[in-house]
Image (cartoon, grey):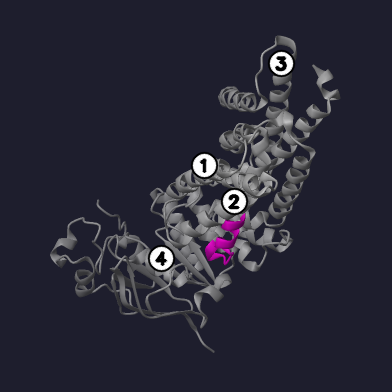
Amino acid sequence: MLDALQYPFFQRALAAGLLASLACGVIGALVVVRRIATISGGLSHSAFGGIGLGYLLGFDPMIGAAGFGVLSAIGIGVAYRRLRHGFDTLIAIVWSVGMAIGILLIAMTPGYAPDLTTYLFGSIVLVPSTYLWIAGSLDLVILVSVIVLFKGLRAVVFDEEFASVSGLPVEALFLVLLSLTGLAVVTLIRVVGVILVIALLTIPAAIARQWSHSLGRMMVYGSVIGAGCTVSGLFLSYWLADGVGVNAPAGPLIILIATAGYGLSILAKRFVRRAV
Amino acid sequence: MNTTAVEVRDVSLAFNEVPVLEEVSLTLEQGDFLGLIGPNGGGKTTLLRVILGLVKPDRGDVRVFGKPPSRARGEVGYVPQYARFDASFPIDVLEVVLMGRLTRGALFSRVTAEDREAAQAALVRVQMADLGSRQIGELSGGQLQRVLVARALAVEPRILLLDEPTASIDTPIGRSVYELLEDLAREKTIVLVSHDIGVISRYVKTVACLNRHLHYHHSKELTPEMVEATYGCPVELLGHGHPHRVLEEHPPTGGLGE
């Protein structure tokens, strides 16, 4: 199975998976403890509108996805804080409107959109090297922002009221968190697809939470767990194709492995608690 | 020298056109220990939030040490009625208490030795000195409440605002919180919101009643008129083991509903 490593496409897939894992661990921890994990689903679907725009105007759809992701994030954040609209309502709106725009723009694009499904369902084995550059840059932005703003972000996701009493720029920090989530989503789209992004931003962080005593550690554990899931999903997919002759795309396998890990983690936690 | 700690002048506030505070005026001198009582929905929490600058009044003016609330952040420590955070958050007690230091412009800088000392001193004061590394999810309700008090103390504020700090804890620990407040009252200005009039009358220096309108006479005495105006019920009702009791005299046990 290790012979897979000699293929450039597999190396790129591995790199894409690891870059995505970093974003999913760091941002996943923040959205999971703040209980706004569903925003990752909303933002990934809204990013589809940007993908459509990229198709229509002929630029890299990932750039469009990043733009739509961040703008939707800020839109949700401002509407939530200023208009006091329900967070879940806003997510539902952004979720479906992004898809609607994407579908319309792609329909208007002349000719056929051959690799549309790679965005919808992900296709980690087909990632171009430009995507690695994009994902790497986004990771860098996410990592630097979270490290610099760590105390403020943690205070806001922990207890917004007290953060506000302390004089922190709560609204700005919240908008930064949502925007970074919009960027994190983009790093995940090629790996598991628009539809499954929410799982990779939620499940590894949820597993990490069961075993960590600090937010920082939860980010590290989440990234490692995310990496474990993507790498094993990739190898499983390769083995199924190469050894068994079954075509099983890596994206869904990654999600199923993560979910199985979540179940095992709950059982293990019970076991540990009983043993203590 | 100006000794006024808090000045609330003619503050009115409505939520969705329902008036919550009407023409509320309140002046606190440094060293005051005010007990604020009133029925649920009477605006007690809202008044604290106005003083904290979390809510802007529709009319009127608020000054904390002569400054608008937004510029007096480091002067005020706030203890909410209940923890507004998720107890399963991966964080330990010391880290929570250290959040009281964010006021000091410590957003980007590392935690200093001074911050650690202030946080540890605050934990000592609430008798949780050895629980700093405990996860907050492993604390009892009373311990969690004391962490909230410690977080407010870590600010090293000159004013402490407490919103029913013992609402969720059992009596002996509640009493230790009040004894701590009595102790702190020697050096700080304190506003204590409570519905527990027995406790209020035992520890505080002055009492105010709030039910949209504030009734305050700079004394500890509750006149029947104040109570009636605040609770809207005849005074006769108030001597029968009802939580409203504690006018003038009460037995030393002072318990409620006994």
- The chain containing the residue under callout 4 comes to B
Give me the C-alpha separation between circle 4 and circle 1. Answer: 39 Å
Give the position of the N terminus of chain A as an image quadrant: top right
Give the secondary structure at mark 3. helix
Residue identifier under label 4: B192
Q: Nearer the viewer, residue A105 or A184?
A: A105
In the rendered structure, which segment of residues is drawn in magenta? Answer: A164-176
Mark in the foreground, 3 or 4 = 3
Residue A165 is a magenta residue: yes
Q: In this rendered view, identify the residue nearer to me: A36 or A40.
A: A40
Whole-Å distance between the Cαs marked 1 and 2?
17 Å
The residue where tag 2 is placed is A68
Q: Could you tell me residue A94's position as x and y percent? A: 49, 48
**Three-letter amino acid code at the position of disc 4:** Leu
Where does label 3 land, which residue?
A: A241
Is residue B202 at least partly visible in the picture? Answer: no
Q: Residues within 10 Å of mark 2 (few under 14, many from 20)?
A: many
Q: Chain of mark 2?
A: A
